Amino acid sequence: MKIIAAELRELALPLKQPFVIAYNTWRSMPTLILTLFTDEGLVGYGECVPDEGVTGETISSTLAMLRDTLLPLVLGQSAFDLEEFHRAAEERVHGAYAAKAAIDIAMHDLKAKACGVPLYKLLGGHSQEVTVPAVISIIPPDEMPSALAPYQTQGYRQYKLKLGGQPPEDIRRVEVARQTLGAKARIKVDANQGFATADNALKIMHAISRYDIELVEQPVKHWDYEGLKRVRERSDLSLMVDEGVRTGRDLWRLLSLTGIDWVNVKLMKCGGLLPAMKLVALAEIAGVKVQVGSMLESSIASAAGAHLHRALPAIYASEMVGPHHFAADIGDFSYRGDEVVFSERAGLGIEVDRERLAGLTLRGVRLDEQDDYSDLRQLNS
């Protein structure tokens, strides 16, 4: 099964509400949707959502990286050769993990479709149901009850609160959330590096510990392993690292310097499903719990993360919440309350609305085996 052509489209998926975290605010989510075509007529989908604050990539740099450097590595090659793609891609360029993830996901989609099975069966089979939390961006504390209410009505059991690093407001957000949700709801908080220093992190964490917090995610800057160590030594709250771990090398270094309780593995940070599985294996050996995280991705990458979670028992949680936040999506990823619904179709199992995909395309290219490419705006006209 040879890859003979590729389409790459830039979109800005509209959000129902602005999504606010410590270091950025999004009103729409920029994403690149990759389509790979094979000589056997199969079509595979991938996606990348770059984040300057996490992967160091922009939407424009990622489009150029895929078009000029990475896609030529797979055109004319077998869709089954995932290890070879990653070896060649790493040899050509260090990093560019979101760009690599788009190709990795599309190749996995093709591989599972060629085998005629849903992706989770290819990755390891059914091990667990997949649930998601309600993710609440940074909002004024007095707006918390109304933001939580729809999720309570739908029976959500897990809640993740984004915090911004200002102690009085952050503490009040957590207090109001616990009062609103009651004692049984699971609450975790995510600083996205916003607490900045270990001292500020400890101040906030000490104050919110009375509200039965499951874990605190990335309280200090991604590079501050010493600060992370200090926080862990002086707080009883469980810690998750997100921005501080992209690759297995990062996790290995972190484990050698300080312990952690959780690691947030994101396909966009590590380069896709194959590198993610290696990260999960390393975390499992080290006794670290794994969450599969999201960059607010469309149905495509959300499905990839959900299949990974379903297949691997070492993954304790995932946050495939992007489709819930979009006013318009390109696929049919769906939920039943807080549970992800799997279609059981082969591959990612996502039915892509090609008309909507074309309508949301801002720019794009089509490449063939000869490395020739055409502007998709001309192709669509």
Image (spheres, grey):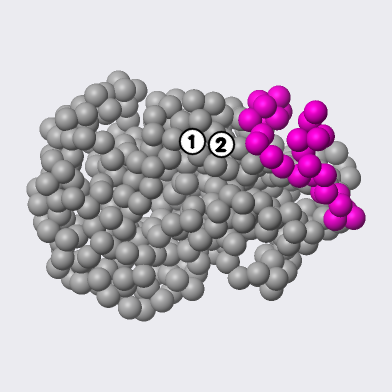
Q: Amino acid at mark 2?
A: Ala
Q: Position of residue 313 (x, y in %)?
A: 46, 52
In which image quadrant can residue 70 be found? Answer: bottom right
N-terminal-most mark, 2 or 1: 2
What are the residue bounds of the magenta stretch? 353-381
Pinpoint residue 81: horizontal percent, then vertical percent: 76, 60
Q: Is the Cβ of the residue at disc 2 closer than 8 Å to that at disc 1?
A: yes
SS label for mark 1:
strand
Image-based side of 197 in relation to 121, left or right? left
Where is residue 200? Give x, y as percent.
17, 61
- Gap in angstroms between the C-alphas marked 2 and 1: 6 Å
| Residue assigned mark 2 | 12
Q: Which disc number belongs to residue 5?
A: none
Q: Is residue 377 magenta?
A: yes
The structure residue drawn at horizontal position 44% and vertical position 57%, both measured from the top left corner, is: 53
Q: Secondary structure at mark 2?
A: strand
Q: Nearer the viewer, residue 49 or 344?
A: 49
Front residue (pair 328, 74):
328
Q: Give the residue number, with chain letter if any, for mark 1.
A: 28
